[in-house]
Image: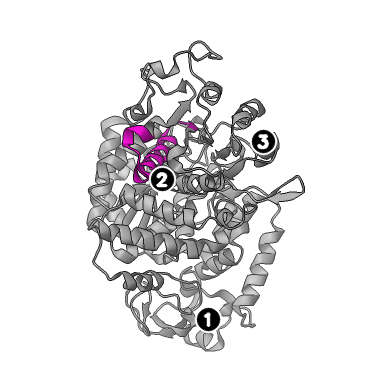
């Protein structure tokens, strides 16, 4: 059962929810156990009488401010990051309104706990810290019952779905069903950063087994204890899922998350023209990185088309970043071939070149002709390493998405700093333990000249008597706003040009463009404003491409604003039991 709104429109709204009245039929303990409706100690005297709560709560009626003070105090008492993660997830399972109020008031402090980097630890420990189910768990042995599983979803109307198969969680590898922490965390950011109503979101894990032997032998592991299915079996499993999603939630935005490299791009290409879908590891990471590069290039007195860019990591994220950079360079006037020639992708086997027989199809467009390396003196005779690229190409941008900690060492960075006045260096691998370098070292090795952004949050660096704020290249600055724009414009598909529009909107909001001591990226405290800017750009682009409903441009800001939910308690009115949908 979900409540129905009595006063106001059917749209989510930024107005104070305390001004709304909704009808509900739940009473007593059932009401207290519904996280979307529970107010805890904030139920007033009338509600306690009307809904059979007398004696079930302490006598004092708390204000939400008192609840926030109490809850934050308890959060601060937790002895480590994992305990803080467990506390917040438990609060979300108990009282979603209070959870999001707390998160918004302490978003810079708590986002790293509910998402990167701490969510990685939560995923690793998922089967040991499991409390309550959230979302849907769809396992391969029950694949013929997917429609029935979707019918069991807590909400009957869904705007955003995030799905994972847990095979490549952050830089931690195959975590099986533990990957569920990622869709849950991502959707929390959709709500916190862009106001997507929590009852309109759905996290899903596709349990295709795991090749993690520690999990397979762990007696507490909650997933299907079987090696991962592959090939036709896997593809048929995904196809059954997509067919069921399309039938049950035909208008929902589907986000693929943390799929392995060999599946991520393939699945995106297969389904992007069949439903409204995208892969955040490929497109979201690419767009947010492009935004930071565009802002950094302006600070360095250069422009995007003039840059040579070296990337360590040639998987889904590395190629996705490359694709977005190419799109940006093409928009700025280069041909696609010219743009691709300016990107130098390397992996564990060295530079992607046409001499390598181990490249995937999606990597080959960035493979360099061997004759471009003619005359180079190589450190190793059998491969062109990243340091060889730095010495011979002189890139002004260096990006890390390799999950290899400390891959950007002092020799590499100082070589880059010898020829580049303002090196642009983005060690983006998550979690923090996988970062290619620490900002403090990058700034010291470049004598304070580097323009740095990271994938995980880092504290400011004190150098030469000045405080250098390090921006976080956080996908939360892109994907929530993209989702908001899709919902507000009722777009039917997601395109690369929508991501390019989102990147442009984010780049224009860079604090460093106003003050060079500020970070390249806005902080999450501004995430709702940033999401509105991104949503507007995405919605306009969707309309331009004929993929959204035709609204007047001056109507879009209102549609975006009214699509945003804010966490505040509503007034309740009791009715006999019936089912409706809260919007």
* Other-residue count near label 3 (Cα within 10 Å), few / some / many at <14 / 14–19 / ≥20: many
The answer to whether 276 is drawn above or below residue 410 in the figure is: below
* Tag in front: 2 or 3: 3
Q: Is residue 251 visible?
A: no
Left or right, 29 with respect to 446, comes to left
Which residue range is magenta in the image? 310-339
Instruction: Identify the disc placed on residue 257.
Output: 2
| Residue 360 or residue 297, whichever sits in front | 297
The x, y position of residue 512, in whole percent, is 58, 53
Q: Which residue is mark 1?
A: 53
The x, y position of residue 515, in whole percent, is 61, 56
Residue drawn at point x = 60 percent, y = 30 percent = 419
In the rendered image, which quarter contains the N terminus? bottom left
Q: Which residue is mark 3?
A: 446
What separation in Å lies between label 3 and label 1 (alpha carbons)?
63 Å
Give the dominant element type of the magenta stretch: helix, strand or loop: helix
Residue drawn at point x = 47 percent, y = 26 percent = 347
* Other-residue count near label 2 (Cα within 10 Å), few / some / many at <14 / 14–19 / ≥20: many
Q: Secondary structure at mark 2?
A: loop
Q: Secondary structure at mark 1?
A: loop
What separation in Å lies between label 2 and label 1 (alpha carbons)?
41 Å
Q: Quadrant of residue 160?
A: bottom left
| Residue 396 or residue 96, whichever sits in front | 396
The answer to whether 55 is drawn above or below residue 172 in the figure is: below
Q: Mark 2 vs mark 3: which is more N-terminal?
A: 2
Q: Is residue 341 magenta?
A: no
In the rendered image, which quarter contains the C terminus? bottom left
Instruction: Identify the disc placed on residue 129.
Output: none
Q: Is residue 337 magenta?
A: yes
Q: Mark 3 vs mark 1: which is more N-terminal?
A: 1
Q: Quadrant of residue 72?
A: bottom right
């Amino acid at each position: 059962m979900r409540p129905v709104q009595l006063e106001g429109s059917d749209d989510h709204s930024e107005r104070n929810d305390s001004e709304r009245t909704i009808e509900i039929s739940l009473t007593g303990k059932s009401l207290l156990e519904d996280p979307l409706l529970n107010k805890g100690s904030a139920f007033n005297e009338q509600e306690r009488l009307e809904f059979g709560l007398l004696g079930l709560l302490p006598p004092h009626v708390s204000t939400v401010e008192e609840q926030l003070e109490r809850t934050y105090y308890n959060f601060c008492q937790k002895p480590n990051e994992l305990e803080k993660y467990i506390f917040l997830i438990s609060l979300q399972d108990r009282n979603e309104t209070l959870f999001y109020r707390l998160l918004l008031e302490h978003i810079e402090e708590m986002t790293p706990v509910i998402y990167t980097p701490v969510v990685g630890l939560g995923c690793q420990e998922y089967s040991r810290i499991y409390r309550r189910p959230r979302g849907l768990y769809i396992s391969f042995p029950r694949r013929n019952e997917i429609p029935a599983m979707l019918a069991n979803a807590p909400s009957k109307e869904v705007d955003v779905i995030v799905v994972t198969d847990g095979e490549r969680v952050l830089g931690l590898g195959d975590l099986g069903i533990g990957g569920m922490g990622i869709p849950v965390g991502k959707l929390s950011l959709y709500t916190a950063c862009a106001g997507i109503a929590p009852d309109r979101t759905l996290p899903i894990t596709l349990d295709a087994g795991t090749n993690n032997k520690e999990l397979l032998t762990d007696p507490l592991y909650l997933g299907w204890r079987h090696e991962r299915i592959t090939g036709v079996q896997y593809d048929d499993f995904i196809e059954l899922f997509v067919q069921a999603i399309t039938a049950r939630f035909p208008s929902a935005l589907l986000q693929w998350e943390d799929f392995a490299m060999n599946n991520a791009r393939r699945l995106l290409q297969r389904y992007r023209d069949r439903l409204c879908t995208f892969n955040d590891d490929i497109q979201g990471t690419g767009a947010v990185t492009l935004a930071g590069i565009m802002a950094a290039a302006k600070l360095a007195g250069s422009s995007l088309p003039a840059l040579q860019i070296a990337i360590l990591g040639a998987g889904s994220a590395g190629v996705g970043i490359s694709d977005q950079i190419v799109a940006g360079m093409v928009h700025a006037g280069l041909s696609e071939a010219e743009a691709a020639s300016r990107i130098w992708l390397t992996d564990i086997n060295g530079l992607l070149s046409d001499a390598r027989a181990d490249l995937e199809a999606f990597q080959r467009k960035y493979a360099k002709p061997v004759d471009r390396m003619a005359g180079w003196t190589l450190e190793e005779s059998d491969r062109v390493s990243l340091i060889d690229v730095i010495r011979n190409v002189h890139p002004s941008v260096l990006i890390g998405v390799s999950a290899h900690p400390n891959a950007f060492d002092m020799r590499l960075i100082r070589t880059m700093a010898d020829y580049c006045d303002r090196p642009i260096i983005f060690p983006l691998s998550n979690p923090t333990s996988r970062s290619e370098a620490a900002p403090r070292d990058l700034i010291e090795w470049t004598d304070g000249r580097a323009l740095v952004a990271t994938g995980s949050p880092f504290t400011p660096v004190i150098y030469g008597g000045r405080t250098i704020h390090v921006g976080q290249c956080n996908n939360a600055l892109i994907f929530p706003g993209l989702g908001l724009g899709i919902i507000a414009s009722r777009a039917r598909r997601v395109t690369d040009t929508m991501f390019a529009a989102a990147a442009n909107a984010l780049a224009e909001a860079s604090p460093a463009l106003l003050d060079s001591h500020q970070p390249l990226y806005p902080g999450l405290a501004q995430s709702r404003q940033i999401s509105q800017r991104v949503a507007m750009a995405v919605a306009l682009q969707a309309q331009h491409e004929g993929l959204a409903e035709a609204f007047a441009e001056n109507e879009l800001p209102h549609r975006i604003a009214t699509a945003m939910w804010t966490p505040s308690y509503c007034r309740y009115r009791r009715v006999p039991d019936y089912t409706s949908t809260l919007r």
